[in-house]
Image (tube, rainbow, N blue to C red):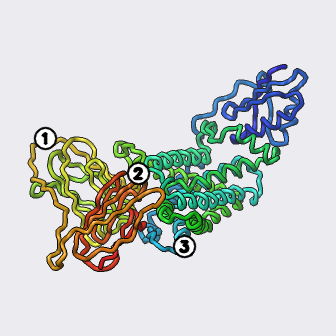
Amino acid sequence: MKKLNLNVKGMTCASCEVLLERGMKKVPGVHKVQVSRSKEKAYIRCDNDVNIEDLQAAVADKGYTLIPHDAIDTPIRPSFIVKNKKKYAEIGAVLLFIVGAYFILNQFDLLPKSLGITDNMSYGFVFVIGLVAATSTCLAVAGGLLLAVANKHNEANPHLTGRQKFQPHIWFNIGRIASYVLLGGLIGALGSVLSISPKVTGIITIIASVFMIIMGVQLLQIFPWMNKIQLKMPKFIAHKIYDASHQEQSKKAPGKLSSFLFGGSTFFLPCGFTQALQLYVLGTGDFVTGALVMLAFSLGTLPALAGIGAFTSFAKGKTQRHFTTFSAVLVIMLGIFALPNGMVLAGANVGDLGFSATSATNIEGIEIVDGFQIVKMKVESLDYYPNKFQILEGVPVRWEIDGRNAQGCAQVISVPSKGITEFLPQNDIKVIEFTPDKVGKIRFSCTMGMAGPGVFDVIPNTQGIKGAELQEVQKEQGCNPEFQQCNVQKVQMEISREKGFYPNDFEVQQGVPVELEIDAKLQLGGCMGTMVLPKYGVTHVIPKGKSTLKFTPTEKGIVDVTCSMGSKQAQFRVI
Protein backbone atom coordinates (compact mmCIF):
# COMPACT_ATOMS: atom_id res chain seq x y z
CA MET A 1 0.00 0.00 0.00
CA LYS A 2 1.13 3.55 -0.68
CA LYS A 3 -0.21 7.10 -0.53
CA LEU A 4 -0.08 9.51 -3.46
CA ASN A 5 -0.36 13.27 -3.13
CA LEU A 6 -1.18 14.76 -6.55
CA ASN A 7 -1.96 18.22 -7.87
CA VAL A 8 -5.03 18.39 -10.11
CA LYS A 9 -5.52 20.83 -12.98
CA GLY A 10 -8.75 21.39 -14.86
CA MET A 11 -11.32 21.40 -12.04
CA THR A 12 -14.03 23.99 -12.66
CA CYS A 13 -16.66 23.26 -10.01
CA ALA A 14 -17.41 21.18 -6.94
CA SER A 15 -18.86 18.40 -9.11
CA CYS A 16 -15.38 17.74 -10.41
CA GLU A 17 -14.45 16.32 -7.01
CA VAL A 18 -17.06 13.60 -7.41
CA LEU A 19 -16.11 12.85 -11.02
CA LEU A 20 -12.41 12.55 -10.18
CA GLU A 21 -13.04 10.34 -7.17
CA ARG A 22 -15.32 8.02 -9.14
CA GLY A 23 -12.97 7.90 -12.12
CA MET A 24 -9.84 7.04 -10.14
CA LYS A 25 -11.64 4.49 -7.95
CA LYS A 26 -12.22 2.42 -11.09
CA VAL A 27 -8.48 1.83 -11.44
CA PRO A 28 -7.60 -1.66 -10.08
CA GLY A 29 -5.69 -1.41 -6.81
CA VAL A 30 -7.10 1.99 -5.78
CA HIS A 31 -8.74 1.79 -2.36
CA LYS A 32 -9.52 5.37 -1.39
CA VAL A 33 -9.57 8.73 -3.17
CA GLN A 34 -10.21 12.17 -1.68
CA VAL A 35 -10.23 15.25 -3.93
CA SER A 36 -10.31 18.89 -2.80
CA ARG A 37 -11.39 21.54 -5.30
CA SER A 38 -10.24 24.44 -3.07
CA LYS A 39 -6.74 22.97 -2.62
CA GLU A 40 -6.60 21.47 -6.15
CA LYS A 41 -5.28 18.28 -4.58
CA ALA A 42 -6.02 14.56 -4.80
CA TYR A 43 -5.06 12.14 -2.04
CA ILE A 44 -4.99 8.50 -3.12
CA ARG A 45 -4.41 5.31 -1.14
CA CYS A 46 -3.56 2.42 -3.45
CA ASP A 47 -1.43 -0.69 -4.05
CA ASN A 48 2.26 -0.26 -4.80
CA ASP A 49 1.88 -1.28 -8.46
CA VAL A 50 -0.57 1.57 -9.26
CA ASN A 51 1.15 4.38 -11.15
CA ILE A 52 0.21 7.92 -12.08
CA GLU A 53 -0.20 7.01 -15.74
CA ASP A 54 -3.03 4.61 -14.88
CA LEU A 55 -4.79 7.26 -12.81
CA GLN A 56 -4.30 9.89 -15.52
CA ALA A 57 -5.77 7.61 -18.15
CA ALA A 58 -8.87 7.13 -16.01
CA VAL A 59 -9.68 10.88 -15.92
CA ALA A 60 -8.05 12.27 -19.07
CA ASP A 61 -11.29 12.12 -21.11
CA LYS A 62 -12.87 14.51 -18.63
CA GLY A 63 -10.15 17.12 -19.14
CA TYR A 64 -8.24 16.71 -15.86
CA THR A 65 -4.45 16.62 -15.50
CA LEU A 66 -2.68 14.92 -12.58
CA ILE A 67 0.76 16.21 -11.59
CA PRO A 68 2.99 14.72 -8.86
CA HIS A 69 3.41 17.09 -5.94
CA ASP A 70 7.21 17.06 -6.28
CA ALA A 71 7.15 17.83 -10.02
CA ILE A 72 5.40 21.17 -9.80
CA ASP A 73 7.13 24.47 -9.24
CA THR A 74 6.10 26.76 -6.44
CA PRO A 75 2.81 28.17 -7.71
CA ILE A 76 2.42 31.89 -8.18
CA ARG A 77 -0.31 33.25 -5.97
CA PRO A 78 -3.11 34.71 -8.07
CA SER A 79 -3.73 38.41 -7.70
CA PHE A 80 -6.48 39.55 -5.36
CA ILE A 81 -8.35 41.24 -8.19
CA VAL A 82 -8.13 40.95 -11.98
CA LYS A 83 -6.75 44.09 -13.65
CA ASN A 84 -8.75 44.37 -16.85
CA LYS A 85 -10.06 47.84 -17.76
CA LYS A 86 -12.21 46.45 -20.59
CA LYS A 87 -13.95 44.09 -18.16
CA TYR A 88 -14.72 46.85 -15.68
CA ALA A 89 -15.99 49.12 -18.46
CA GLU A 90 -18.38 46.36 -19.53
CA ILE A 91 -19.58 45.87 -15.92
CA GLY A 92 -20.08 49.63 -15.51
CA ALA A 93 -22.05 49.86 -18.76
CA VAL A 94 -24.31 46.98 -17.70
CA LEU A 95 -24.86 48.57 -14.28
CA LEU A 96 -25.84 51.90 -15.86
CA PHE A 97 -28.19 50.11 -18.27
CA ILE A 98 -29.99 48.22 -15.48
CA VAL A 99 -30.34 51.29 -13.25
CA GLY A 100 -31.45 53.43 -16.19
CA ALA A 101 -34.00 50.85 -17.35
CA TYR A 102 -35.43 50.62 -13.84
CA PHE A 103 -35.89 54.38 -13.47
CA ILE A 104 -37.40 54.74 -16.96
CA LEU A 105 -39.90 51.92 -16.40
CA ASN A 106 -40.70 53.26 -12.96
CA GLN A 107 -41.13 56.82 -14.27
CA PHE A 108 -43.68 55.71 -16.87
CA ASP A 109 -45.38 53.39 -14.36
CA LEU A 110 -44.63 50.33 -16.51
CA LEU A 111 -43.53 48.12 -13.64
CA PRO A 112 -46.40 45.77 -12.69
CA LYS A 113 -48.25 46.45 -9.45
CA SER A 114 -49.52 43.84 -7.02
CA LEU A 115 -52.68 41.90 -7.76
CA GLY A 116 -55.12 41.24 -4.96
CA ILE A 117 -55.62 37.67 -3.80
CA THR A 118 -59.34 37.20 -3.30
CA ASP A 119 -61.69 34.44 -2.27
CA ASN A 120 -63.20 32.06 -4.84
CA MET A 121 -60.52 32.68 -7.49
CA SER A 122 -60.62 30.56 -10.63
CA TYR A 123 -57.52 28.60 -11.65
CA GLY A 124 -57.40 30.70 -14.82
CA PHE A 125 -57.15 33.88 -12.76
CA VAL A 126 -54.40 32.33 -10.61
CA PHE A 127 -52.54 31.52 -13.86
CA VAL A 128 -52.82 35.20 -14.89
CA ILE A 129 -51.44 36.22 -11.48
CA GLY A 130 -48.46 33.95 -12.22
CA LEU A 131 -47.91 35.65 -15.59
CA VAL A 132 -47.81 39.07 -13.94
CA ALA A 133 -45.75 37.87 -10.96
CA ALA A 134 -43.06 36.50 -13.28
CA THR A 135 -42.41 40.03 -14.56
CA SER A 136 -41.95 41.54 -11.11
CA THR A 137 -41.26 40.19 -7.64
CA CYS A 138 -41.14 36.49 -8.53
CA LEU A 139 -38.70 37.19 -11.37
CA ALA A 140 -36.48 38.99 -8.86
CA VAL A 141 -36.52 36.00 -6.53
CA ALA A 142 -36.77 32.93 -8.78
CA GLY A 143 -35.21 34.48 -11.89
CA GLY A 144 -32.17 35.72 -10.01
CA LEU A 145 -31.55 32.31 -8.48
CA LEU A 146 -32.11 30.61 -11.86
CA LEU A 147 -29.60 32.89 -13.60
CA ALA A 148 -27.01 32.27 -10.90
CA VAL A 149 -27.35 28.48 -10.99
CA ALA A 150 -27.60 28.07 -14.77
CA ASN A 151 -24.80 30.49 -15.66
CA LYS A 152 -22.49 28.89 -13.13
CA HIS A 153 -23.28 25.47 -14.62
CA ASN A 154 -22.63 26.73 -18.16
CA GLU A 155 -19.38 28.38 -17.07
CA ALA A 156 -18.19 25.07 -15.62
CA ASN A 157 -19.16 23.25 -18.83
CA PRO A 158 -18.17 25.59 -21.70
CA HIS A 159 -18.34 22.94 -24.44
CA LEU A 160 -21.98 22.00 -24.02
CA THR A 161 -24.42 22.55 -26.87
CA GLY A 162 -27.28 25.03 -26.59
CA ARG A 163 -29.70 22.18 -25.89
CA GLN A 164 -27.45 20.84 -23.13
CA LYS A 165 -27.08 24.30 -21.58
CA PHE A 166 -30.85 24.64 -21.54
CA GLN A 167 -31.23 21.50 -19.40
CA PRO A 168 -30.56 23.23 -16.02
CA HIS A 169 -33.39 25.62 -16.85
CA ILE A 170 -35.71 22.72 -17.62
CA TRP A 171 -34.86 20.96 -14.36
CA PHE A 172 -35.10 24.18 -12.38
CA ASN A 173 -38.64 24.75 -13.61
CA ILE A 174 -39.58 21.08 -13.15
CA GLY A 175 -38.37 21.29 -9.55
CA ARG A 176 -40.23 24.58 -9.08
CA ILE A 177 -43.52 23.18 -10.40
CA ALA A 178 -43.17 19.89 -8.50
CA SER A 179 -42.51 21.63 -5.17
CA TYR A 180 -45.35 24.10 -5.70
CA VAL A 181 -47.81 21.28 -6.37
CA LEU A 182 -46.66 19.03 -3.52
CA LEU A 183 -46.14 21.68 -0.86
CA GLY A 184 -49.21 23.64 -1.95
CA GLY A 185 -51.26 20.49 -1.46
CA LEU A 186 -49.72 19.85 1.96
CA ILE A 187 -50.47 23.40 3.08
CA GLY A 188 -54.04 23.04 1.87
CA ALA A 189 -54.44 19.76 3.74
CA LEU A 190 -52.64 20.60 6.95
CA GLY A 191 -53.74 24.22 7.34
CA SER A 192 -51.10 26.44 8.86
CA VAL A 193 -48.91 23.64 10.20
CA LEU A 194 -46.36 24.50 7.51
CA SER A 195 -46.61 28.28 7.92
CA ILE A 196 -43.17 29.84 8.13
CA SER A 197 -42.45 32.38 10.84
CA PRO A 198 -41.14 35.80 9.77
CA LYS A 199 -37.77 35.06 11.39
CA VAL A 200 -37.29 31.80 9.45
CA THR A 201 -38.39 33.55 6.25
CA GLY A 202 -35.80 36.26 6.95
CA ILE A 203 -33.02 33.71 7.48
CA ILE A 204 -33.93 31.97 4.21
CA THR A 205 -33.90 35.33 2.44
CA ILE A 206 -30.46 36.18 3.82
CA ILE A 207 -29.00 32.81 2.78
CA ALA A 208 -30.47 33.09 -0.72
CA SER A 209 -29.25 36.68 -1.06
CA VAL A 210 -25.69 35.84 0.00
CA PHE A 211 -25.70 32.85 -2.36
CA MET A 212 -26.81 35.05 -5.27
CA ILE A 213 -24.15 37.66 -4.52
CA ILE A 214 -21.37 35.06 -4.34
CA MET A 215 -22.51 33.35 -7.55
CA GLY A 216 -22.79 36.70 -9.34
CA VAL A 217 -19.28 37.80 -8.32
CA GLN A 218 -17.89 34.42 -9.40
CA LEU A 219 -19.54 34.83 -12.81
CA LEU A 220 -17.81 38.20 -13.26
CA GLN A 221 -14.41 36.47 -12.76
CA ILE A 222 -12.74 39.50 -11.20
CA PHE A 223 -11.76 37.88 -7.89
CA PRO A 224 -9.82 34.65 -8.67
CA TRP A 225 -9.69 33.63 -4.99
CA MET A 226 -13.50 33.46 -4.87
CA ASN A 227 -13.49 30.41 -7.12
CA LYS A 228 -12.49 28.43 -4.04
CA ILE A 229 -15.85 29.19 -2.46
CA GLN A 230 -18.06 26.29 -3.45
CA LEU A 231 -21.70 25.81 -2.45
CA LYS A 232 -22.41 22.12 -2.78
CA MET A 233 -24.24 19.16 -1.35
CA PRO A 234 -22.33 16.54 0.70
CA LYS A 235 -20.29 14.38 -1.65
CA PHE A 236 -21.62 11.12 -0.25
CA ILE A 237 -25.11 12.10 -1.44
CA ALA A 238 -23.78 12.83 -4.93
CA HIS A 239 -22.01 9.43 -5.01
CA LYS A 240 -25.23 7.65 -4.01
CA ILE A 241 -27.15 9.47 -6.72
CA TYR A 242 -24.56 8.42 -9.29
CA ASP A 243 -24.75 4.82 -8.10
CA ALA A 244 -28.53 4.80 -8.27
CA SER A 245 -28.76 6.39 -11.71
CA HIS A 246 -25.81 4.53 -13.31
CA GLN A 247 -24.51 7.76 -14.81
CA GLU A 248 -20.92 7.61 -13.63
CA GLN A 249 -19.61 9.19 -16.81
CA SER A 250 -22.09 12.07 -17.04
CA LYS A 251 -21.25 15.59 -15.97
CA LYS A 252 -24.84 16.63 -16.34
CA ALA A 253 -26.34 14.75 -13.38
CA PRO A 254 -25.12 17.14 -10.67
CA GLY A 255 -26.39 20.06 -12.75
CA LYS A 256 -29.80 18.43 -13.14
CA LEU A 257 -30.08 17.61 -9.47
CA SER A 258 -28.89 20.97 -8.14
CA SER A 259 -31.11 22.83 -10.61
CA PHE A 260 -34.11 20.69 -9.57
CA LEU A 261 -33.47 21.32 -5.87
CA PHE A 262 -32.89 25.05 -6.30
CA GLY A 263 -36.07 25.31 -8.34
CA GLY A 264 -37.96 23.50 -5.60
CA SER A 265 -36.51 25.81 -2.95
CA THR A 266 -38.14 28.89 -4.53
CA PHE A 267 -41.40 27.84 -2.85
CA PHE A 268 -39.91 29.06 0.44
CA LEU A 269 -38.52 32.38 -0.85
CA PRO A 270 -40.48 35.52 0.03
CA CYS A 271 -42.08 36.51 -3.26
CA GLY A 272 -45.17 38.50 -2.27
CA PHE A 273 -47.40 36.70 -4.78
CA THR A 274 -46.22 33.28 -3.63
CA GLN A 275 -46.80 34.11 0.02
CA ALA A 276 -50.25 35.52 -0.65
CA LEU A 277 -51.30 32.36 -2.48
CA GLN A 278 -49.76 30.14 0.21
CA LEU A 279 -51.89 31.98 2.74
CA TYR A 280 -54.92 31.71 0.47
CA VAL A 281 -54.71 27.91 0.36
CA LEU A 282 -54.30 27.70 4.15
CA GLY A 283 -58.02 28.06 4.59
CA THR A 284 -59.06 25.67 1.83
CA GLY A 285 -58.51 22.58 3.97
CA ASP A 286 -58.10 20.47 0.83
CA PHE A 287 -54.96 18.88 -0.65
CA VAL A 288 -56.24 18.87 -4.24
CA THR A 289 -57.36 22.51 -4.18
CA GLY A 290 -54.06 23.67 -2.68
CA ALA A 291 -52.07 21.66 -5.22
CA LEU A 292 -54.08 22.93 -8.21
CA VAL A 293 -53.89 26.58 -7.11
CA MET A 294 -50.10 26.46 -6.79
CA LEU A 295 -49.82 24.46 -10.04
CA ALA A 296 -51.74 27.15 -11.93
CA PHE A 297 -49.53 29.86 -10.41
CA SER A 298 -46.22 28.07 -11.16
CA LEU A 299 -47.33 27.42 -14.75
CA GLY A 300 -48.10 31.13 -15.07
CA THR A 301 -44.50 32.00 -14.11
CA LEU A 302 -43.10 29.42 -16.56
CA PRO A 303 -43.10 31.46 -19.84
CA ALA A 304 -40.94 34.28 -18.44
CA LEU A 305 -38.49 31.92 -16.71
CA ALA A 306 -38.26 29.66 -19.76
CA GLY A 307 -37.62 32.72 -21.95
CA ILE A 308 -34.64 33.64 -19.80
CA GLY A 309 -33.41 30.08 -20.14
CA ALA A 310 -33.72 30.02 -23.93
CA PHE A 311 -31.80 33.27 -24.32
CA THR A 312 -28.94 32.29 -22.01
CA SER A 313 -28.64 28.79 -23.50
CA PHE A 314 -28.63 29.54 -27.23
CA ALA A 315 -26.85 32.91 -27.31
CA LYS A 316 -23.39 32.76 -28.93
CA GLY A 317 -20.08 34.63 -28.84
CA LYS A 318 -20.09 38.25 -27.66
CA THR A 319 -23.84 38.15 -27.07
CA GLN A 320 -23.41 35.29 -24.63
CA ARG A 321 -20.51 37.02 -22.86
CA HIS A 322 -22.40 40.30 -22.52
CA PHE A 323 -25.52 38.56 -21.25
CA THR A 324 -23.46 36.62 -18.71
CA THR A 325 -22.09 39.92 -17.42
CA PHE A 326 -25.61 41.36 -17.43
CA SER A 327 -26.91 38.32 -15.50
CA ALA A 328 -24.07 38.51 -12.98
CA VAL A 329 -24.62 42.22 -12.24
CA LEU A 330 -28.39 41.73 -12.02
CA VAL A 331 -28.00 38.76 -9.67
CA ILE A 332 -25.66 40.76 -7.40
CA MET A 333 -28.05 43.73 -7.31
CA LEU A 334 -31.05 41.52 -6.53
CA GLY A 335 -29.08 39.84 -3.76
CA ILE A 336 -27.98 43.15 -2.25
CA PHE A 337 -31.46 44.68 -2.30
CA ALA A 338 -33.04 41.52 -0.86
CA LEU A 339 -30.71 41.52 2.16
CA PRO A 340 -32.32 44.36 4.16
CA ASN A 341 -35.80 42.82 4.03
CA GLY A 342 -34.42 39.47 5.14
CA MET A 343 -32.51 41.10 8.00
CA VAL A 344 -35.61 42.98 9.15
CA LEU A 345 -37.63 39.75 9.21
CA ALA A 346 -34.81 37.98 11.05
CA GLY A 347 -34.73 40.70 13.70
CA ALA A 348 -31.50 42.48 12.73
CA ASN A 349 -31.07 46.20 13.27
CA VAL A 350 -30.93 47.23 9.62
CA GLY A 351 -31.20 50.91 10.48
CA ASP A 352 -27.72 50.78 12.02
CA LEU A 353 -26.15 49.43 8.82
CA GLY A 354 -26.61 52.61 6.83
CA PHE A 355 -28.73 51.21 3.99
CA SER A 356 -32.26 50.09 3.35
CA ALA A 357 -34.44 48.73 0.60
CA THR A 358 -35.79 52.20 -0.23
CA SER A 359 -33.94 55.04 -1.89
CA ALA A 360 -34.97 57.89 0.41
CA THR A 361 -32.72 58.15 3.47
CA ASN A 362 -32.64 61.89 4.22
CA ILE A 363 -33.06 62.92 7.84
CA GLU A 364 -36.05 65.19 8.19
CA GLY A 365 -35.82 68.39 10.26
CA ILE A 366 -37.74 68.56 13.54
CA GLU A 367 -40.93 70.65 13.32
CA ILE A 368 -42.91 71.25 16.54
CA VAL A 369 -46.49 72.55 16.32
CA ASP A 370 -48.77 72.88 19.39
CA GLY A 371 -46.51 70.61 21.41
CA PHE A 372 -46.33 67.84 18.76
CA GLN A 373 -43.40 66.86 16.57
CA ILE A 374 -44.86 66.77 13.05
CA VAL A 375 -43.58 63.92 10.86
CA LYS A 376 -44.86 63.48 7.30
CA MET A 377 -44.26 60.38 5.19
CA LYS A 378 -45.51 58.95 1.88
CA VAL A 379 -45.82 55.28 1.01
CA GLU A 380 -45.20 54.46 -2.67
CA SER A 381 -45.75 50.78 -3.46
CA LEU A 382 -43.51 49.11 -0.83
CA ASP A 383 -41.24 52.11 -0.18
CA TYR A 384 -41.29 54.86 2.45
CA TYR A 385 -40.37 58.43 1.51
CA PRO A 386 -38.49 59.48 3.56
CA ASN A 387 -37.69 56.42 5.66
CA LYS A 388 -35.51 57.99 8.35
CA PHE A 389 -36.52 60.66 10.87
CA GLN A 390 -34.83 62.41 13.76
CA ILE A 391 -37.10 63.17 16.72
CA LEU A 392 -36.75 64.44 20.30
CA GLU A 393 -37.10 62.28 23.38
CA GLY A 394 -40.21 62.90 25.49
CA VAL A 395 -42.10 65.09 22.98
CA PRO A 396 -45.23 63.52 21.40
CA VAL A 397 -45.05 62.74 17.68
CA ARG A 398 -47.90 63.31 15.23
CA TRP A 399 -47.08 61.01 12.33
CA GLU A 400 -49.01 61.88 9.15
CA ILE A 401 -48.85 59.03 6.63
CA ASP A 402 -50.05 59.28 3.02
CA GLY A 403 -50.66 55.63 2.12
CA ARG A 404 -52.88 56.17 -0.91
CA ASN A 405 -50.28 54.55 -3.21
CA ALA A 406 -49.34 51.72 -0.84
CA GLN A 407 -49.31 48.21 -2.27
CA GLY A 408 -49.61 44.76 -0.67
CA CYS A 409 -48.56 44.51 2.94
CA ALA A 410 -47.43 48.17 2.92
CA GLN A 411 -51.10 49.05 3.48
CA VAL A 412 -50.49 48.10 7.11
CA ILE A 413 -47.75 49.82 9.12
CA SER A 414 -46.28 48.31 12.26
CA VAL A 415 -44.11 49.78 15.04
CA PRO A 416 -43.45 46.71 17.24
CA SER A 417 -41.66 48.56 20.07
CA LYS A 418 -44.64 50.91 20.52
CA GLY A 419 -47.34 48.26 20.03
CA ILE A 420 -48.67 50.10 16.96
CA THR A 421 -50.27 48.30 14.02
CA GLU A 422 -52.49 50.45 11.80
CA PHE A 423 -54.21 50.18 8.42
CA LEU A 424 -53.47 52.98 5.92
CA PRO A 425 -56.68 54.18 4.21
CA GLN A 426 -56.72 54.52 0.42
CA ASN A 427 -58.54 57.88 0.44
CA ASP A 428 -57.20 59.78 3.44
CA ILE A 429 -54.14 60.66 5.51
CA LYS A 430 -53.51 58.37 8.47
CA VAL A 431 -52.46 60.13 11.68
CA ILE A 432 -50.63 58.14 14.37
CA GLU A 433 -49.59 59.69 17.67
CA PHE A 434 -47.04 58.31 20.11
CA THR A 435 -44.43 59.53 22.58
CA PRO A 436 -40.74 58.49 22.20
CA ASP A 437 -39.91 57.85 25.85
CA LYS A 438 -36.20 57.02 25.53
CA VAL A 439 -33.17 57.71 23.35
CA GLY A 440 -32.47 55.09 20.66
CA LYS A 441 -34.01 53.63 17.52
CA ILE A 442 -37.70 53.06 16.84
CA ARG A 443 -38.10 50.90 13.74
CA PHE A 444 -41.15 50.43 11.59
CA SER A 445 -42.19 48.41 8.53
CA CYS A 446 -45.16 46.41 7.34
CA THR A 447 -46.09 43.35 9.40
CA MET A 448 -44.11 41.09 7.03
CA GLY A 449 -40.94 43.19 6.83
CA MET A 450 -41.35 43.58 3.04
CA ALA A 451 -42.10 47.32 3.07
CA GLY A 452 -39.43 49.81 4.08
CA PRO A 453 -37.87 49.44 6.59
CA GLY A 454 -37.86 52.83 8.30
CA VAL A 455 -36.50 54.22 11.56
CA PHE A 456 -37.01 57.06 14.05
CA ASP A 457 -33.71 58.19 15.56
CA VAL A 458 -34.64 59.47 19.03
CA ILE A 459 -32.13 62.06 20.31
CA PRO A 460 -31.86 63.69 23.79
CA ASN A 461 -34.14 66.62 24.52
CA THR A 462 -31.28 68.87 25.69
CA GLN A 463 -33.37 72.07 25.46
CA GLY A 464 -36.03 70.73 27.79
CA ILE A 465 -38.86 71.26 25.29
CA LYS A 466 -42.22 70.32 26.77
CA GLY A 467 -44.72 68.62 24.56
CA ALA A 468 -48.48 68.43 24.61
CA GLU A 469 -50.30 65.99 26.84
CA LEU A 470 -51.08 62.94 24.71
CA GLN A 471 -54.64 61.87 25.47
CA GLU A 472 -55.47 58.18 25.47
CA VAL A 473 -57.76 57.62 22.50
CA GLN A 474 -60.77 55.50 23.30
CA LYS A 475 -61.45 53.19 20.38
CA GLU A 476 -64.61 51.74 21.86
CA GLN A 477 -67.59 52.55 19.66
CA GLY A 478 -71.04 52.88 21.20
CA CYS A 479 -74.44 52.14 19.80
CA ASN A 480 -75.98 54.21 17.05
CA PRO A 481 -79.02 55.97 18.58
CA GLU A 482 -80.96 55.49 15.31
CA PHE A 483 -81.24 51.80 16.12
CA GLN A 484 -83.22 50.40 19.02
CA GLN A 485 -80.97 47.48 19.87
CA CYS A 486 -77.76 48.51 21.65
CA ASN A 487 -76.45 45.19 22.93
CA VAL A 488 -72.97 44.17 21.84
CA GLN A 489 -72.97 41.43 19.20
CA LYS A 490 -70.47 38.79 20.29
CA VAL A 491 -69.24 36.26 17.75
CA GLN A 492 -66.46 33.71 18.04
CA MET A 493 -63.76 32.34 15.74
CA GLU A 494 -61.23 29.56 16.20
CA ILE A 495 -57.95 29.43 14.30
CA SER A 496 -56.37 25.99 14.24
CA ARG A 497 -54.45 23.61 12.01
CA GLU A 498 -57.48 21.37 11.64
CA LYS A 499 -60.13 24.00 10.85
CA GLY A 500 -58.20 27.05 9.64
CA PHE A 501 -60.26 30.24 10.24
CA TYR A 502 -63.55 28.80 11.52
CA PRO A 503 -66.19 29.96 11.16
CA ASN A 504 -65.35 32.57 8.54
CA ASP A 505 -68.82 33.89 7.66
CA PHE A 506 -70.84 35.95 10.17
CA GLU A 507 -74.20 37.70 10.01
CA VAL A 508 -74.40 40.87 12.15
CA GLN A 509 -76.78 43.83 12.51
CA GLN A 510 -76.06 47.33 11.28
CA GLY A 511 -75.27 49.95 13.93
CA VAL A 512 -74.65 47.47 16.76
CA PRO A 513 -71.06 47.07 18.07
CA VAL A 514 -69.42 43.75 17.21
CA GLU A 515 -66.86 41.89 19.31
CA LEU A 516 -65.11 39.07 17.48
CA GLU A 517 -63.54 36.78 20.06
CA ILE A 518 -60.58 35.01 18.44
CA ASP A 519 -59.06 31.84 19.89
CA ALA A 520 -55.79 31.17 18.04
CA LYS A 521 -54.51 27.67 18.81
CA LEU A 522 -51.17 28.42 17.14
CA GLN A 523 -48.88 31.35 16.42
CA LEU A 524 -49.57 32.63 12.90
CA GLY A 525 -46.69 33.77 10.69
CA GLY A 526 -46.44 36.11 7.73
CA CYS A 527 -49.33 38.41 6.83
CA MET A 528 -51.87 35.98 8.33
CA GLY A 529 -50.79 37.14 11.77
CA THR A 530 -52.62 40.43 11.15
CA MET A 531 -56.37 40.81 10.70
CA VAL A 532 -57.61 43.88 8.79
CA LEU A 533 -61.05 45.37 8.10
CA PRO A 534 -60.11 47.78 5.27
CA LYS A 535 -63.60 49.29 5.12
CA TYR A 536 -63.33 50.58 8.69
CA GLY A 537 -59.56 50.96 8.99
CA VAL A 538 -59.44 48.39 11.79
CA THR A 539 -56.23 46.40 12.32
CA HIS A 540 -55.75 43.61 14.84
CA VAL A 541 -52.55 41.63 15.49
CA ILE A 542 -53.48 38.01 16.26
CA PRO A 543 -51.52 36.63 19.23
CA LYS A 544 -51.50 32.98 20.19
CA GLY A 545 -54.38 32.48 22.58
CA LYS A 546 -57.49 34.61 23.00
CA SER A 547 -57.98 38.18 21.77
CA THR A 548 -60.86 40.43 20.67
CA LEU A 549 -61.41 42.50 17.54
CA LYS A 550 -64.00 45.31 17.91
CA PHE A 551 -65.83 47.48 15.37
CA THR A 552 -69.29 48.89 14.63
CA PRO A 553 -70.80 48.15 11.19
CA THR A 554 -72.39 51.40 9.97
CA GLU A 555 -73.50 50.25 6.51
CA LYS A 556 -75.33 47.24 5.11
CA GLY A 557 -73.45 44.82 2.85
CA ILE A 558 -70.30 42.66 2.98
CA VAL A 559 -67.40 43.62 5.24
CA ASP A 560 -64.26 41.68 4.24
CA VAL A 561 -61.68 40.56 6.79
CA THR A 562 -58.23 40.18 5.22
CA CYS A 563 -54.59 39.69 6.13
CA SER A 564 -52.16 42.59 5.69
CA MET A 565 -51.63 41.65 2.03
CA GLY A 566 -55.32 41.47 1.18
CA SER A 567 -55.81 37.69 1.32
CA LYS A 568 -59.37 37.12 2.55
CA GLN A 569 -59.74 35.45 5.94
CA ALA A 570 -63.45 35.91 6.70
CA GLN A 571 -66.45 38.15 6.10
CA PHE A 572 -69.30 39.88 7.96
CA ARG A 573 -72.70 40.12 6.27
CA VAL A 574 -74.29 43.26 7.70
CA ILE A 575 -78.11 43.28 7.70
Across and down, in percent, residue 218 comes to: 60, 44
**Tags 3 and 1 in contact by the CB under 8 Å rule?**
no
Q: Quadrant of residue 65?
A: top right
Circle 3 Cα neighbour tier, 10 Å, few/some/many (<14 / 14–19 / ≥20): some
Across and down, in percent, residue 90 comes to: 57, 53
Q: CA distance from mark 2 to mark 1?
A: 42 Å
Camera-near label (2 vs 1) is: 2
The residue that mark 1 highlights is 462
The residue that mark 3 highlights is 128
Judge left or right: residue 20 versus residue 151.
Answer: right
Camera-near label (3 vs 1) is: 3
Q: CA distance from mark 3 to mark 2?
A: 32 Å
Q: Quadrant of residue 76?
A: top right
Q: Nearer the viewer, residue 250 or 237?
A: 237
Judge left or right: residue 311 versus residue 386.
Answer: right
Evaluate whether residue 359 shows in this view.
Answer: no
Q: Secondary structure at mark 3?
A: helix
The residue that mark 2 highlights is 523
